[in-house]
């Protein structure tokens, strides 16, 4: 089931569907010349995430989750991690009545999501 969400580019590169769709979104925005401040935030976020993922063996480094398991697309942040400041270093605990969940995000994720949210807001106006 998980092979559906992976795209293989030769023997060397395997990227997830999310990374691929982000790359396609950036190309579409550039080709349609729909570049504004909010789409620049999206492009910057994608580029920052690409730099971190590609320089760390196609896996996004993440700070220690302690009790949560890592996804196959992530690895732990170590001293050997390249561009550690672009990794998933910010952690938010979401506390519910029946569960607690930890979410990790990076500077690139923040830029990407802010660009998406602000783009949607301006489209709805």
Image (cartoon, rainbow, N blue to C red):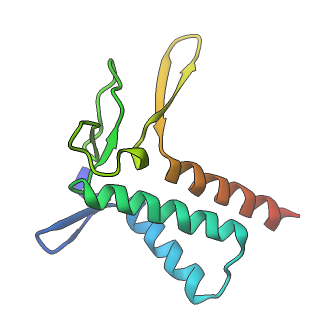
> Vertically, is 79 above or below 42?
above
Residue lying furthest top in this view? 97
Q: Residue at x 35, y 38 (%)?
A: 62
* Quarter of the image where one finds residue 64: top left
Residue 6 position, x and y percent, is 27, 60
Can you say which quadrant of the picture contains the C terminus?
bottom right
Tally the marks. Answer: 0
Can see residue 6? Answer: no
Residue lying furthest left in this view? 11
Q: Residue at x 83, y 63 (%)?
A: 124
> Vertically, is 83 above or below 46?
above
Camera-side residue: 75 or 122?
75
Residue lying furthest right in this view? 125
Can see residue 98? Answer: yes
Q: Residue at x 48, y 63 (%)?
A: 46
Residue 40 position, x and y percent, is 63, 70
Would you say 118 lies left or right of 55 here? right
Residue 87 position, x and y percent, is 39, 45
> Vertically, is 100 above or below 4?
above
Q: Residue at x 48, y 45 (%)?
A: 106
Would you say 110 lies left or right of 24 here? right
Residue 63 position, x and y percent, is 36, 32
């Amino acid at each position: 089931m998980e092979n559906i969400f992976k795209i293989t580019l030769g023997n060397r590169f395997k990227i997830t569907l999310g990374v691929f769709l982000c790359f396609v979104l950036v190309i579409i925005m550039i080709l349609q010349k729909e570049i504004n401040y909010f789409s620049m935030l999206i492009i910057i976020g994608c580029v920052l995430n690409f730099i971190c993922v590609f320089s760390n063996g196609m896996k996004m480094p993440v700070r220690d989750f302690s009790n949560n398991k890592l996804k196959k697309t992530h690895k732990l942040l170590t001293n050997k991690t390249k561009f550690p400041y672009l990794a998933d270093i910010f952690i938010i605990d979401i506390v519910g009545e029946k569960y607690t969940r930890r979410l990790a995000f990076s500077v690139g994720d923040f830029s990407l999501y802010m660009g998406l949210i602000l783009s949607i807001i301006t489209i709805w106006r």
